């Protein structure tokens, strides 16, 4: 019985093969029209680092989304470098807002031979990581690290596309003293490179403006209970309280200030100036002041950016997504001008950048800071961030695209509004 | 001291009592498990977190289904919804992670506990997302004044509920048959078994009771700070464990005393450490203060303030 089964199955297989060969007897189909061969692809990796876990994961994801949108749009548009079509792969990494993890991740990216890095998010992780990128000669553009030290280290590879804390601290300190009339100020920071650096700058500016610093308190970047230090500050009766740190803590802090019945003005920096702050503080967010190291979202020079972002990620822009978007674009722009994706070759082009991004005109000074950085002061009214004034910025937006010509006269109007708002 | 200084002191003490009540509730969970099993359940802080987040989800659901309910009722119902979730979780952790290792060398369940803690944090991150969730003020957070210090109704509720639950637990452990069985198991597991106590059931019940307290503690922490997120249990668990050790591990009264004491130390420490050290140490060292006290207490009284009570292992 077995042998007949073997014979039967072999016959069946042969028959199948034979039948399949039958199709070949038809006349061969006409050859397809000769499509132009797709251009050879130039695949590169761009690294992006931000805290994707932990209490500011929402900000890290926001940054990564901005970079991802840029990569997708550039890949779709098709940029030609070295005669090949550029295809970028975004290598997104998580540094958990921890300097130790930041350096490990940086080494990982260097070993992966990325062509450029957008990141990190926190100054505290960006600064240590920058040494690794500098040693490897990989250009690094941070979309959100505002601590001045980042560009003062003398590295050729460090850049940032927003204003730094020297400018921001001065703006906030001056605002508190001159516009809010605060004579006694209490300052709290979270002891990270960012929080401490910004708080120090605000202290300098406030003292220069003639105010007295009545308390200098500290917390950690993962604490949620500030009642002890706020109670201590309550005893000093400050006109204003400034917090240098992120929204994950500024929110509860604002709430606890209200719960303790402290009547004071609460200010914070760009780390806290997000929709998340309002969500966490609830109605205690009313009347809180904060600053951002860039243009307001509704004044971005690319009006469609907000819509495209929302459509792609189904989320609101937290704060720095437009900056990571521009950072990727600046890297690619430099690659285009050097006609090379090799960091050794295109690094020299980055300082010469003059690029019209969604956040405005981007050009770097000799240290890698952005020229004509903008600081925007906000307050919270009716549960929304409301622009009070915009300081700095390029004198007039050059008409690189037709739509831009309309921006130049508009740049005057917000300043006039801001002047009115400040007069109130 | 001026009147303002007294007010500040009173405020710090009140803050410390609220903080301490929460630590006490969570410390009870640690101490009970250590008492019967000799195991530090590092995952307990995560059970607190799951309690808070489950209550938040339940509250959101209630708001959709029955929009007209008053705040405190929503809070009560969502707490009642979170309790079974935590009970089931506590039972599951014991059955799956700890029971197979009951007679293994001490290190194995310890590492497993840490592993369960990480696992729960990541599950919570996947289920509820990474961002901080705003826990609405179902009980008012508007301050009222007591002799110049402020308190909010939420804080009063926290203290009252904590005291009630601790009293309930003491009654259970000292005046009921179940409590006697628990104490017997804690004293000597094998002999208790010989006396007719169902050891496995008692251990499971211990975990379940601890998880109930954890669920309530989680809701209270979330209501007090108006925040719930996947990482909130870790540091809280660590501090509550410290409180349990401070008061004497395995000792229920010790856990409560340790919790309250730790809360007060943290609050007063953060408030006065700057003045005490002449500005050398700032308020970001408030944890140092608490752990320093722990070390001093353990050096002079190794079994904690009220003495430890651990099962005898034959």
Image: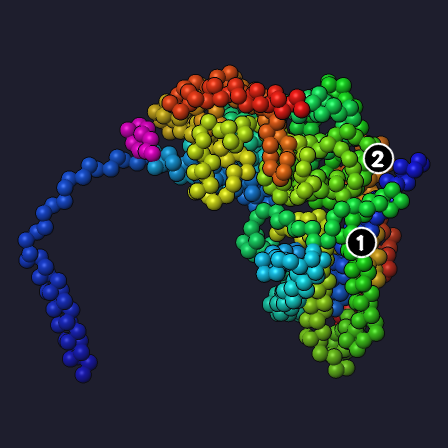
In the rendered view, does A4 fall on the left or right side of A386?
A: left
Extreme residue in the right direction = B1
How many neighbours does mark 1 have within 10 angstroms: few (below 14), some (14-19), or many (20 or more)?
Answer: few
B269 with respect to A135 (left or right): right
Residue B200 pos. (x, y %) = 68, 75
Q: How is the image coloured?
A: rainbow
Residue A34 shows in the view: yes
Chain ID of residue with mark 2: A
C-alpha span from label 2 to label 1: 23 Å
Q: Is residue B56 magenta?
A: no
Q: Quadrant of residue B271?
A: top right
- Report which residue position mark 1 lands on: B156
For the magenta stretch, what is the residue range? A77-85
x, y (%) of residue B132? 61, 47
Element under disc 1: helix
Q: Quadrant of the C terminus of chain B?
A: bottom right
Q: Give the label, 2 or 1, closer to the camera.
A: 1
Give the camera-side residue of A377 and A350. A377
The residue drawn where x is 15% and y is 76% is A8
Which of B271 and A177 lies nearest the eye of the viewer? Answer: A177
């Amino acid at each position: 019985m077995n042998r007949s089964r073997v014979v039967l199955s072999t016959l069946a297989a042969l028959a199948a093969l034979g039948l399949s060969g039958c199709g070949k007897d038809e006349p061969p189909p006409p050859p397809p029209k000769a499509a132009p061969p797709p251009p050879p692809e130039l695949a590169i990796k761009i690294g992006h680092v931000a805290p994707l876990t932990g209490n500011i994961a929402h900000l890290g994801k926001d940054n990564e989304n901005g970079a991802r949108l840029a990569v997708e749009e550039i890949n779709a548009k098709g940029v030609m470098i070295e005669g090949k079509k550029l295809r970028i792969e975004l290598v997104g990494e998580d540094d958990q807002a921890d300097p130790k993890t930041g350096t490990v991740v940086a080494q990982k990216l260097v070993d992966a031979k990325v062509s450029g890095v957008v990141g990190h998010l926190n100054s505290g992780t960006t600064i240590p990581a920058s040494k690794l990128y500098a040693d490897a000669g990989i250009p690094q553009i941070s979309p959100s690290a505002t601590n001045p030290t980042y560009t003062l280290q003398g590295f050729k590879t460090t850049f940032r596309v927003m204003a730094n804390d020297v400018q921001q601290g001065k703006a906030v300190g001056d605002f508190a003293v001159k516009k809010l009339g605060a004579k006694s100020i209490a300052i709290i920071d979270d002891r990270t490179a960012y929080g401490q650096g910004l708080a120090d700058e605000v202290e300098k500016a406030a003292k220069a403006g003639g105010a007295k610093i009545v308390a200098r308190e500290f917390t950690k970047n993962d604490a949620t209970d500030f009642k002890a230090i706020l109670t201590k500050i309550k005893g000093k009766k400050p006109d204003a309280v400034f917090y240098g740190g992120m929204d994950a803590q500024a929110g509860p802090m604002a709430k606890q200030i209200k719960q303790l019945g402290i009547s004071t003005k609460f200010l914070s920096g760009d780390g806290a100036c997000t929709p998340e702050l309002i969500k966490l503080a609830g109605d205690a967010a009313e009347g809180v002041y904060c600053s951002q190291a860039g243009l307001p979202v509704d004044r971005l020079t690319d009006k469609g950016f907000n819509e495209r972002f929302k459509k792609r990620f189904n989320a609101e822009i937290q704060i720095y997504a437009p900056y990571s978007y521009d950072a990727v674009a600046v890297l690619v722009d430099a690659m285009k001008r050097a006609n090379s994706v090799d960091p050794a070759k295109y690094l020299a082009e980055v300082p010469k950048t003059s690029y019209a991004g969604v956040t405005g005109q981007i050009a770097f000074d000799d240290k890698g800071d952005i020229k004509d950085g903008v600081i925007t002061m906000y307050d919270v009214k009716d549960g929304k961030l409301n622009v009070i004034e915009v300081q700095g910025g390029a004198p007039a937006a050059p008409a690189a695209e037709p739509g831009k010509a309309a921006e130049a006269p508009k740049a005057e109007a917000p300043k006039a509004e801001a002047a009115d708002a400040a007069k109130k | 001291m001026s009147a303002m200084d007294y007010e500040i002191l009173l405020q710090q003490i009140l803050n410390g009592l609220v903080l301490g009540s929460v630590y006490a509730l969570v410390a009870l969970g640690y101490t009970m498990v250590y008492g019967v099993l000799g195991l530090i359940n590092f995952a307990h802080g995560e059970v607190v977190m799951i309690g808070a987040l489950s209550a938040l989800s339940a509250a959101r659901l209630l708001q959709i289904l029955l929009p007209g309910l008053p705040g405190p009722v929503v809070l009560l119902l969502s707490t009642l919804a979170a309790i079974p979730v935590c009970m089931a979780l506590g039972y599951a952790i014991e059955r799956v992670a700890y029971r197979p290792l009951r007679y293994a060398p001490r290190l194995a369940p310890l590492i497993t506990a840490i592993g369960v803690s990480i696992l729960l944090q990541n599950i919570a991150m996947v289920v509820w997302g990474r961002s901080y969730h705003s826990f609405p003020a179902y009980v008012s957070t508007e301050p009222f004044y007591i002799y110049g210090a402020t308190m909010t109704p939420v804080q009063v509720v926290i203290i009252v509920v904590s005291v009630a639950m601790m009293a309930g637990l003491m009654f259970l452990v000292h005046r009921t048959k179940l409590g006697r069985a628990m104490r017997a198991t804690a004293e000597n597991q094998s002999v208790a078994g010989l006396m007719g106590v169902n050891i496995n059931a008692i251990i499971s019940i211990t975990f379940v009771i601890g998880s109930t307290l954890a669920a309530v503690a989680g809701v209270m922490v979330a209501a007090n700070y108006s925040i719930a997120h996947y990482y909130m249990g870790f540091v809280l668990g660590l501090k509550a464990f410290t409180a349990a050790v401070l008061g004497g591990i395995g000792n229920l009264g010790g856990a409560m005393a340790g919790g309250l004491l730790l809360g007060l130390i943290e609050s007063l420490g953060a408030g006065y450490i700057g003045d005490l050290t002449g500005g050398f140490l700032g308020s970001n060292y408030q944890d140092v203060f608490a752990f320093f006290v722990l070390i001093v207490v353990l050096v002079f009284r190794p079994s904690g303030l009220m003495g430890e009570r651990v099962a005898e292992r034959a």
